[in-house]
Image (tube, rainbow, N blue to C red):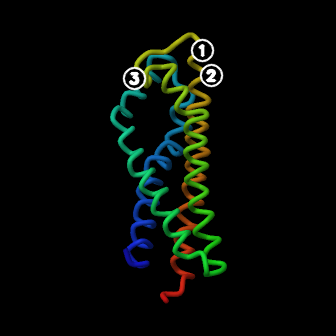
Amino acid sequence: MSLRVVQFLAILLSALALIPSGTHLFELPNKVGLPRDAYLTVQGIYAGWAWFGIIDLAALVLNVLLTVRLRRQRPTFHFAMIAALCFVAFFAIFFAWTFPANQATANWTTLPDDWSGLRRVWEYSHAVNAVVMLVAFCSVTLSVITARQD
């Protein structure tokens, strides 16, 4: 695969990964204070969003591949590496905080007694990941615009 194709796919997939993360960030102020029943109803809009994980995983792979391809170019390599590490951080945050909240609530189809603590963890882990994805997108873009096309 040519460097240009890897660059294009890394940017495209990073941008696509940013969409759901950004959505979670911008809905947070309107959602975080909802009462129990309203919150459970609103969470229903995320049914099927787990499929975005395919894009996140593909973005990780493409950003790692781009990092390897740019290993001899400084500072371009560092930008690519930051983007790849952001995807690693994204998955670490997801599996440490978001996923356990999803599991405890059966993907927000039921609310246990401690639901407000789970909501806080779920909402803020998504907010942090939105920032992580923005850094990844900016970093991969910087890696592309600073790269030499040898």
Q: Image quarter for residue 125?
A: top right
User: SS class of the residue under badge 2?
Assistant: helix
Residue 51 rendering spot, x and y as whole percentages: 35, 42
Q: Choose mark 1 or mark 3, whichever is in front.
A: 1
Rendered residue at 59%/55% (across/down): 86
Badge count? 3
Residue 138 rendering spot, x and y as whole percentages: 56, 66
Mark 3 surroundings within 10 Å by alpha-carbon count, few (fewer than 14), some (14 through 19), many (20 or more): few
Q: Nearer the viewer, residue 108 or 147?
A: 147
Q: Amino acid at mark 3?
A: Thr
Q: Which residue is mark 1?
A: 114
Q: Image quarter for residue 6?
A: bottom left
Mark sitting earlier along the chain (3/2): 3
Q: Is residue 102 above or below residue 30?
A: above
Q: Are marks 1 and 3 in contact (CB under 8 Å)?
A: no
Task: State the separation of the CA atoms marked 1 and 3.
Answer: 17 Å
Q: Amino acid at mark 1?
A: Asp
Q: Is residue 2 above or below residue 49?
A: below
Q: Are marks 2 and 1 in contact (CB under 8 Å)?
A: yes
Q: Which residue is mark 2?
A: 117
Rendered residue at 49%/40% (across/down): 27
Q: Which residue is mark 3?
A: 41
